[in-house]
Amino acid sequence: MRMALSIRNQLPGTVTNVTPGEVMATVGIRLTGGQNLTAAITREAVTELALTPGTPVRALVKSTEVSLATGPVAGLSIRNQLPGTITDITTGEAMASVKLDVDGGALTAAITREAVDDLALKTGDPAVALIESTEVSLSTT
């Protein structure tokens, strides 16, 4: 049974590697659509979730932690860059919700309306979701 969460961005995948550090670990994930994603979580969480290569997981990311670019970005510390296509934009006075189809799933980004205007985002346009590894949580499925 899947837990009900307010986090809309839930991408299924499989752990490919775990690199432990003193307190934190990085966890490589191959998403169902074939993209790679990195999560930076505590070593304690790695142990509690029994994460090893081959473990099925769900990557969870709040929509407020997803940034958008109109193409791949070089020279950036953000390693999680998922290309996709904009499927819907809902704008309010200050903020906008932008839905993006990526291979194997969908993401929602909550960004400012000004950013939507500045980037001239439109439904059907390509875009790249940028997600810091420290903003990716994991759950076992």
Image (cartoon, grey):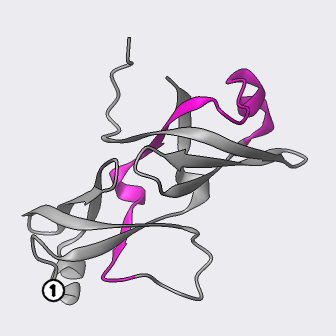
- Secondary structure of the residue carrying numbered label 1: loop
Q: Which amino acid does label 1 sit on?
A: Ala
In the rendered structure, the answer to whether residue 65 lies left or right of residue 24 reads left
Q: In this view of the protein, which residue sits in the foreground, 7 or 27?
A: 27
**Residue drawn at 39 percent across, 48 percent down:** 62
In the rendered structure, the answer to whether residue 115 lies left or right of residue 23 reads left
- Residue pushed farthest top? 1
Total labels: the figure holds 1
**Residue drawn at 62 percent across, 76 percent down:** 77
Whether 16 is drawn above or below 99: the answer is above
Whether 7 is drawn above or below 69: the answer is above
- Residue pushed farthest right? 22
Residue 70 at x, y percent in the picture:
30, 82
Mark 1, Cα crowd under 10 Å, few <14 / some 14-19 / many 20+, is few
**Residue drawn at 16 percent across, 79 percent down:** 121
Give, as a single range, the part of the protein colored magenta: 42-71
Which residue bears the numbered disc 1?
120
Task: Pick the quarter of the image with the N terminus.
Answer: top left
Asked if residue 49 lies in the magenta stretch, the reply is yes
Residue 45 at x, y percent in the picture:
71, 31
Asked if residue 21 lies in the magenta stretch, the reply is no
Residue 94 at x, y percent in the picture:
16, 69
Q: In this view of the protein, which residue sits in the foreground, 110 or 131?
A: 131
In the picture, residue 50 is in which quadrant? top right
